[in-house]
Image (cartoon, grey):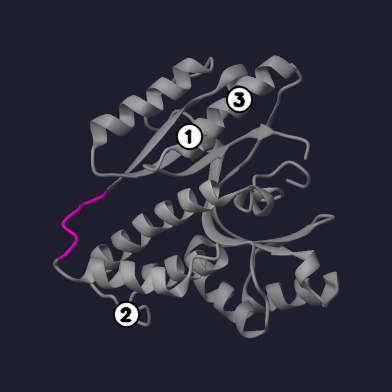
Amino acid sequence: MSGHNKWSTIKQKKGKNDAARAKIFTKIGRELIVAVKEGGSADPSVNSKLRDCIAKAKANNVPNDNIERIIKKAAGEGDSTNYEAVTYEGYGASGVAVIVEALTDNRNRTAGDVRHYFDKFGGNMGTPGCVSFMFEQKGVIVIDREDLEADEDTVMEHALEAGASDFEADEDIFTIYTEPSDMGAIRDDLAEKGYSFVTAEVAMVPNTYTKVEDPAVQEKLQKMLDMFEDNDDIQNVWHNWETEE
């Protein structure tokens, strides 16, 4: 995955501007609400999904006041919005496989938006399962080399001791892979050792990648992905487009 995974540039994308940060805050806010309601508790010590969401929020620099306010609202009677988790699958231009994960309070609206983005940029929305077999669900923890004093061997040793299943080192980042159910515990173990994270999440990681040489097709793909990312209903977009970063 070196050089062409979605995490190699995620830090820069997240820090682009205030509008981009506001979008991220909105999306994570929905995840926090769902975690409280589905987990049945506003206490992260007993609600592991909420604990993971809080860690993700902090990694994305969501202020603690915002996190606490959202959790209190979700736990009380003040928030009657019910978000439904929906996953869409399809193909972008040149057959790039795409998985779109959404949290929506209006399934028809979101499905229409997703279909429109696929169609507008030369792709098509498929049926459930049409591309997910090309991906594997894994815990993915990314650490920025700039944030570390430890060398590569030390980071790898700590990751494997914590229970990681794989470790990769790129020029700018370390990527640690885990079993999905182990991600939170391994993240917490590394955090106790002083590590901070660009991201720590359960992700859909491609088994194979699609290379696109045509600049016009590359532009279509990027515009489609940007449209997905700009939609408040859409939480995550996973794809197997091999981009050279």
Query: Tag 1: residue type?
Result: Phe
Residue for badge 2:
43
**Label 1 to label 2: alpha-carbon separation:** 32 Å
Residue for badge 3:
221
Indicate which disc, 1 or 2, sits on the residue closer to the N terminus: 2
Q: Mark on residue 228?
A: 1
Query: Tag 3: residue type?
Result: Leu
| Stretch in magenta | 78-83
Q: Position of residue 12 (x, y in %)?
A: 68, 51
Category of crowding for the residue at label 2, using alpha-carbon neighbours closer than 10 angstroms: few (below 14), some (14–19), many (at least 20): some
In what element is the residue under mark 3? helix
135 vs 72: above or below: above
Category of crowding for the residue at label 3, using alpha-carbon neighbours closer than 10 angstroms: few (below 14), some (14–19), many (at least 20): many
Category of crowding for the residue at label 1, using alpha-carbon neighbours closer than 10 angstroms: few (below 14), some (14–19), many (at least 20): many
Cβ–Cβ under 8 Å for marks 3 and 1: no
Query: Tag 2: residue type?
Result: Asp
Cβ–Cβ under 8 Å for marks 1 and 2: no
Query: On the image, which quarter does residue 232 sit in?
Result: top left
Q: Reply yes or no: does residue 80 show up in magenta.
A: yes
Q: Reply yes or no: does residue 77 show up in magenta.
A: no
* Residue 137 in sight: no
Residue visible at 62% across and 34% down? Answer: 240
* Residue 223 in sight: yes
